[in-house]
Image (spheres, rainbow, N blue to C red):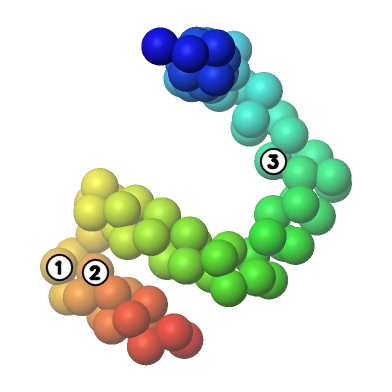
């Protein structure tokens, strides 16, 4: 296990903690965080990541299956 693996593990552990999650939430709610997300979502990689996250989030939402299916079709169609 190299130093890079160790640093990545520590970062992942922090981000999974309540304090790390609050830090992420706070940053994403800030004007700078919103601008960063908007800039990323304007890229092809950002669009792909957004679709992946939306699909995963959709699985855990308590919505009617018909609505989930319609949202999936819209995401697949790149609406």
23 relative to 42, above or below: above
Quarter of the image where one finds residue 43? bottom right
Q: Position of residue 39 (x, y in %)?
A: 75, 62
For numbered disc 3, what is the local secondary structure? Answer: helix
Verify CB contact (< 8 Å) between mark 2 and mark 1.
Answer: yes
The residue depicted at 68 percent of the width and 71 percent of the height is 42
Task: Judge the density around disc 2: few (<14), some (14-19), many (≥20) Cα neighbours within 10 Å.
Answer: some
Give the camera-side residue of 7 and 74: 7
**Residue 27 higher or lower than 70, as above or below:** above
Is label 1 in contact with label 3 (beta carbons under 8 Å)?
Answer: no
Q: Is residue 67 left or right of residue 47?
A: left
The residue that appears at 34% across and 51% down in the rendered structure is 57
Asked whether residue 20 is in view, the answer is yes
Query: Seen in the image, is 56 located left or right of residue 26?
Result: left
**Residue 5 percent coordinates (x, y):** 47, 18
Alpha-carbon neighbours of circle 1 within 10 Å: few (<14), some, or many (≥20)?
A: few
Identify the mark nearer the N-term, 2 or 3.
3
Q: Which residue is mark 3?
A: 28
Q: Which residue sits furthest right?
A: 31
Q: Judge whether residue 18 can be spotted in this image.
A: no
Label 1's element? helix
Q: Earlier in the sequence, mark 1 or mark 3?
A: 3
For residue 68, the mark is: 2
Mark 1 lies on residue: 65
Residue 10 position within the rendered picture, expressed as x and y whole percent measured from the top left: 52, 11
Taking 64 as reference, is 70 left or right? right
Q: Quadrant of residue 67?
A: bottom left
Gap between marks 2 and 3, in whole Å?
Answer: 26 Å
Q: Nearer the viewer, mark 1 or mark 3?
A: 3
What is the distance, in whole Å, between disc 2 and disc 1 at their CAs?
5 Å
């Amino acid at each position: 296990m190299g130093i890079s693996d160790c640093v990545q593990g520590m970062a992942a552990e922090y981000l999974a903690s309540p304090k790390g999650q609050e830090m992420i939430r706070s940053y994403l709610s800030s004007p700078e965080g919103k601008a960063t997300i908007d800039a990323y979502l304007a890229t092809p990689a950002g669009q792909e990541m957004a679709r992946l996250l939306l699909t995963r989030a959709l699985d855990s939402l308590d919505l009617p299956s018909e609505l989930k299916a319609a949202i999936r079709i819209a995401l697949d169609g790149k609406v």
